[in-house]
Image (cartoon, rainbow, N blue to C red):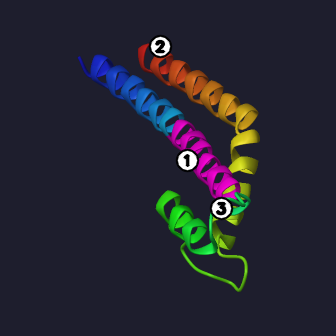
Amino acid sequence: MSETILTVITILGAVLTLGGLAFGARRLRNEYKELSRKLDEVTRISYDESLTSEEQNRQRHAVLAPSSTFGDLEYFREWVRCSILEQAASNLGWPAALTALGVLLSTVASAWGVWV
């Protein structure tokens, strides 16, 4: 009976860890895509010569409210965040795969060790 409980807890621990890893990776990629899309739209609005400066400003803020202003770099923090997210998302593959493999192997070894 105790072996079964330990095995279930071990497998549940692995499922939760892998679920958290997948959730985090998906959230990171979705946040990057959304912020990148909004910044592209802000850039498009900024270069639209058919709009007045006030209209550009109003439309940009409707798409993405800037978190701060640094002189002419109104979306400075957002551009930096987008760059960080892009770097993290592009480098996530192998580390995430190795982590998942490690969790799976350690789970198998732990469950097997309970029964041996």
Contact? badges 2 and 3 (CB < 8 Å): no
106 within the magenta span: no
Q: Which mark is residue 116?
A: 2
- Name which residue lies at 69% across and 53% down: 44
x then y, percent, for residue 11? 41, 23
Question: In which quadrant will I find the N terminus?
Answer: top left
Quadrant of the image occupied by residue 71: bottom right
Task: Please tell me whether the stretch drawn in magenta is mainly helix, strand or loop.
Answer: helix
Along the viewing direction, whichever of 79 and 10 lies nearer the viewer = 79
- Identify the magenta region: 24-45
Amino acid type shown at disc 2: Val
- Name which residue lies at 68% across and 50% down: 40
Contact? badges 1 and 2 (CB < 8 Å): no
26 within the magenta span: yes
Q: Identify the secondary structure beneath mark 3.
A: helix
- Name which residue lies at 65% across and 49% down: 36
Q: CA distance from mark 2 to mark 3?
A: 49 Å
Quadrant of the image occupied by residue 66: bottom right
- Name which residue lies at 63% across and 63% down: 51
Against 69, residue 41 (above or below) is above
Amino acid type shown at disc 3: Arg
Query: Which residue position is annotated with label 1?
Result: 31
Q: Which mark is residue 81?
A: 3
The earlier-in-sequence mark between 1 and 2 is 1
Q: Identify the secondary structure beneath mark 2.
A: loop
Quadrant of the image occupied by residue 49: bottom right
- Number of marks in the image? 3
